[in-house]
């Protein structure tokens, strides 16, 4: 004989279903947490290696944070023989066409930009997503630039700045340059705190 459906029975059943679902989700999270963190660490380490001069330390083990335009930026010091040869700075901007853009920006101790690498973005494929193309003119034009140069302006040429924008992706280009600006301000804050070593 079927049991009569009551409010109490429905609440107990719903609670049991939710409890089982939560246990399954918790188990999946525990199983995937370490592999996801390991993959993210590997991505960060690859980005560090691509944006600073050759180093022999473990920058991710020596990371620290500094303030950059009201936001926190993560700094990975690259050293060789105990001397700082560069800084990989992870910074971001929420001004992208698709939202947040996070970059790893490499600086020499004098502030010269070595290279950049995209950590994450949600820009339009075929347009703004070109920021991920490491050999594109848009990306390579920043290499060797030093923001301390009086002629340097953190803006696209359309806005009176120093850099070409990606065709049909001015918003993305502006956001990318905004990230560079945030990273450079983080670099300046390292210098102010006396942690940067000049070569």
Image: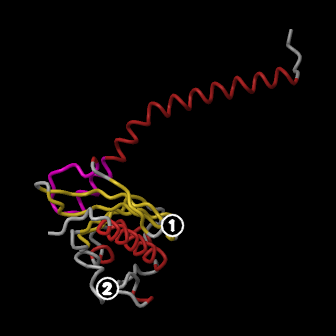
Check the image and report above or below for 106 versus 12.
Answer: below
Q: Residue 23 appears at what percent x and percent y?
A: 58, 26
Q: Main secondary structure of the magenta part?
A: helix
Residue drawn at point x = 85 percent, y = 21 percent: 8
Closer mark to the observer between disc 1 and disc 2: 2
Magenta-span inclusion, residue 50: yes
Is residue 156 on the magenta stretch?
no
Identity of the residue drawn at 62% across and 29% down:
21
Instruction: Determine the CA span between mark 1 and mark 2.
Output: 23 Å
Q: Residues within 10 Å of mark 1 (few under 14, many from 20)?
A: some
Residue 86 in picture, x, y percent from top left = 21, 64
Judged from the image, the secondary structure of the residue bearing numbered disc 1 is strand
Mark closest to the chain's N terminus, 1 or 2: 1
Quadrant where the N terminus is found in the figure: top right
Report the front residue among 141 and 74.
74
Q: Name the residue at 21% across, 57% down.
A: 78
The residue that mark 2 highlights is: 152
Q: Which residues are magenta?
A: 42-60
Say the numbered circle drawn on residue 155: none
Residue farthest toward the left in the current orientation of the protein? 81
- Residue drawn at (23%, 57%) of the image: 49
Q: Residues within 10 Å of mark 2 (few under 14, many from 20)?
A: few
Against 172, residue 66 (above or below) is above
Specify the label residue 94 is tagged with. Answer: 1
């Amino acid at each position: 004989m079927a049991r009569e459906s009551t409010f109490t029975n429905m609440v107990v059943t719903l609670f049991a279903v939710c409890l089982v679902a939560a246990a399954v989700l918790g188990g999946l999270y525990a199983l995937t947490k370490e592999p996801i963190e390991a993959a993210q660490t590997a991505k960060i380490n690859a980005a560090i290696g691509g944006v600073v001069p050759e180093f022999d330390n473990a920058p991710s083990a020596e990371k620290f944070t500094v303030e950059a335009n009201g936001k926190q930026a993560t700094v990975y010091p690259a050293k060789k023989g105990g001397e700082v040869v560069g800084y990989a700075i992870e910074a971001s901007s929420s001004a992208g066409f698709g939202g947040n853009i996070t970059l790893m920006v490499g600086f020499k101790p004098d502030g010269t930009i070595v290279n950049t690498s995209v950590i994450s973005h949600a820009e339009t494929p075929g347009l703004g997503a070109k920021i991920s193309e490491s050999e594109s003119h848009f990306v390579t034009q920043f290499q060797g630039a030093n923001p301390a140069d009086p002629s340097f302006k953190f803006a696209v040429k359309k806005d009176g700045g120093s850099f070409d924008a990606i065709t049909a992706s001015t918003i993305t280009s502006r956001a990318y340059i905004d990230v560079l600006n945030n990273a450079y301000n983080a670099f300046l804050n390292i210098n102010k705190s006396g942690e940067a070593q000049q070569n």
